[in-house]
Image (cartoon, rainbow, N blue to C red):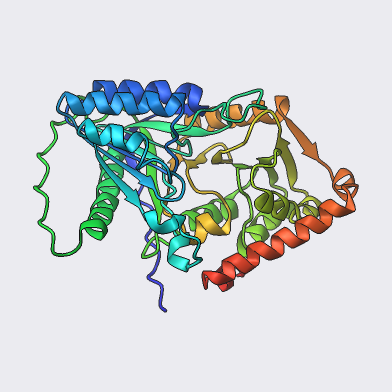
Amino acid sequence: MSILKPAEPVFLPGNRLQLLASGTDYFPALIAAIDAAQHEVHLETYIFANDVTGRAVASALSAAARRGVNVRVLVDGFGARDFATGLGVMLTTSGVEVLVYRPEATRLRLRRHRLRRMHRKLAVIDGCTAFVGGINILDDFDDGAATAPRFDYAIRIEGALVARIHAAVRHVWRLVRWARIGRGARRPPRPLPLAPCGNTAPGTVLAALLIRDNLRHRRDIENAYLDAIAAARDEIIIANAYFLPGRTLRRALIDAARRGVKVTLLLQGRVEYMLQHYATRTLYARLLKAGVRIFEYRPAFLHAKVAVIDTCWATVGSSNIDPFSLLLAREANVVVRDAAFAAELRASLMRALTDAADEISQENHRQRAGWEQLTGAVAYWLVRVLVSVTRYGGQYSR
């Protein structure tokens, strides 16, 4: 099957970005934006939990709908499998339009299309403010053993890029709605045009929206990483929750380290999903040998999907660097070319590296128990088997 040529990222000037660290920053900003909405709210999320945080966001969405705002919520049928019979009922009763992406994922049948999840975390308010990142609608302290909020990031955006994000969420909404009601259903009325935003050029930041889908944008996010890594001259810092790159990306990181670039990975230190956790550790030996520094974050689950390269390029979004994000899921990242923003994100990552992470050396990696090394080898093999079921195994191994 032929694959269309990947689309080139379109960088737009005139944006103002606010970096939001974990739910501590994100949820108050999101709820405030929903509370201020006058016309329209679009929200996409992989998980929408029925917990304190989820109920607070749902309450804000319901209040907006009751005052006449057009509110649309799209959740994933696997990540938010209980949403339709829980908070979704409350939202629908309040006048919120709710759709579920591939709800059939709860059935115990392994088919390729059911592994294609809607993993994006996007929100657009009145066509003027957008949020992009990796933070689900989920309490940061849902893990009772955590000593800190879940480590993750999002961005609040105003400016030219919001229109592209708005178009992206409306596009997927139309696709899911069409799939649910069928080709013969009446077309919904075209939404009224939104009032112009108060400030048409609120900032100076250059930024692009990258999405991953199963058509033209299959490799946009991966290619953005590869291009930035290939161009790196001084430093690469990547924080990623589920890190299991294919051979091409692994080679790119190793080549960068060997040409003198300081390559640092901040990865998951707590076992959230055993298969992914131990499969990732099988990659450590070769990376460490090449000079890549690896740190594991301990205080809470690391859920970030961010990177900073040469303090001039940065990305924040929903895409992990693993086969499921890079080959199957719908993802969305913002890539930023701005020294000030990159420096702010780098400073946040450096604090985590210094204060809350343990460095893994070649020696202590070699000293890990034999059972753990065997578990890693088996886990890596199982991931490869799962990838082969999708028929994309060759692309992952390239």
Q: Is residue 222 above or below residue 305?
A: below
Say which quarter of the image contains residue 34.
top left
Q: State the residue lying farthest toward the front.
A: 85
Q: Is residue 127 visible?
A: no
Q: Residue furthest bottom?
A: 1
- Judging depth in this view, the residue of 156 and 101 nearest the camera is 101
Q: Nearer the viewer, residue 313 or 55?
A: 55
The N terminus - image quarter:
bottom left
The residue located at (65%, 30%) in the rendering is 300
The x and y percentages for residue 359 are 78, 37
Which residue lies at the image location 22% right of the left edge and 30% below the top edge? 94
Task: Pinpoint residue 13: horizontal percent, then vertical percent.
Answer: 33, 38
Q: Is residue 280 left or right of residue 133?
A: right
Q: Quadrant of residue 302?
A: top right
114 displayed left or right of 88: right
Tell me where residue 326 appears, x and y as whole percent.
51, 58
Q: Quadrant of residue 213?
A: bottom left
180, above or below 206, in the image: below
Q: Residue at x 12, y 42 (%)?
A: 191
Q: Nearer the viewer, residue 366 or 44?
A: 44
Q: How many marks?
A: 0
Instruction: Mark yes or no: residue 380 visible.
Output: yes
Classify 280 as above or below 43: below
Q: Quadrant of the C terminus?
A: bottom right
Q: Position of residue 328 (x, y in %)?
A: 47, 60
